[in-house]
Amino acid sequence: MLNRIKKKQDAVDAKAIAPNNKLYLCLLLGATALTGISVIVQECDAAFTIWTSITCGGIASIVVAWLIDAANCKQLNKKAVEHRKTLLSNLYHVFDNGLQLLILESAEKDHYTDSKKWYEWIETVDKQAMNDPTLLPSFIRSLIVFFDDLAEQVFAVKSQEAMLLESGIICQEDIQALSTILSMCDLARATYRSKDNDYKCFQQFSTYCGLIHGMVGFAPSLRPINDMMIEPTLYRKCLEAQEETRTSEASQVPPVSSPKQKGNETNE
């Protein structure tokens, strides 16, 4: 999963920093044109030699400078991708780890063991809550944990936005999306404190999640989050623990003696 995210992120960032190809091309064409003009002075061997030496040297210098600039840009892009991956890794994990409590409750309800995208889990929870309103309070508590974790990580990224924009690690669209996501998280906290009924609160939470899904898809650096497959890790661990408990209890049950064996033991 992380490899797929990295490949998609690399594709987005490949065009972030690039050499000024138009400038180098114009310089190269100009130097080539000056070299062509040398035919005017070809009757004078000394002038022709000097002229062509200068222009050919200029062509070589331009090509070398272009290649060096391209190599430097490639290296800067690579570093930017690494820095972006480190910076946003905690934000990516919020959509996995931060939703595990909600996913656990949802998976236990209908015994889900398959992976889903984060917003698909939200849609599943929405359907379950509409069919069984008694689930609303626990779903709301789990969702507010997710919103709080998300707000904390978004704030950590936004606190460095000036430096991140200047270094090319994130773009203006990312900042706009992060600002909107942070606003959604603040609204979710305000809704939770408003003492509205559970149904209205949950409907608002579902709306906020839908808006966050849209903002994640809008931001180039965040877009891979919508493609992440989130496993019901806690639910699977619970199933494993239950199976281990049953196995352990079964191994500790003493063997039951048959009536015939008991009779033989009495005669002895």
Image (tube, rainbow, N blue to C red):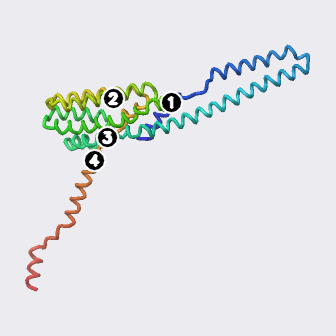
Mark 3: amino acid: Ser
Give coordinates of residue 33: x percent, y percent: 76, 16
Residue under pointer 2? 181
Label 1 neighbour load within 10 Å: few <14, some 14-19, many 20+: some
Residues at marks 2 and 3, CA–CA distance in whole angstroms: 24 Å
- Tell me if 92 is positioned left or right of 196 in this view: right
* Residue at the far bottom in the pictured view: 268
Residue under pointer 3? 115
- Please give the name of the residue rendered at 45% of the width and 38% of the height, measured from the top-left corner: 85
Q: Nearer the viewer, residue 127 or 49?
A: 49
Give above or below for 25 relative to 141. above
**Mark 4 vs 1, N-terminal side:** 1
Mark 3 lies on a secondary structure that is: loop
Residue under pointer 1? 168
- Please give the name of the residue rendered at 28% of the width and 37% of the height, measured from the top-left corner: 146
The answer to whether the residues at label 3 and label 4 have Cβ atoms under 8 Å apart is no
Q: Quadrant of residue 225?
A: top left
Label 3 neighbour load within 10 Å: few <14, some 14-19, many 20+: some
- Tell me if 204 is positioned left or right of 117 in this view: left
Give coordinates of residue 82: x percent, y percent: 49, 39
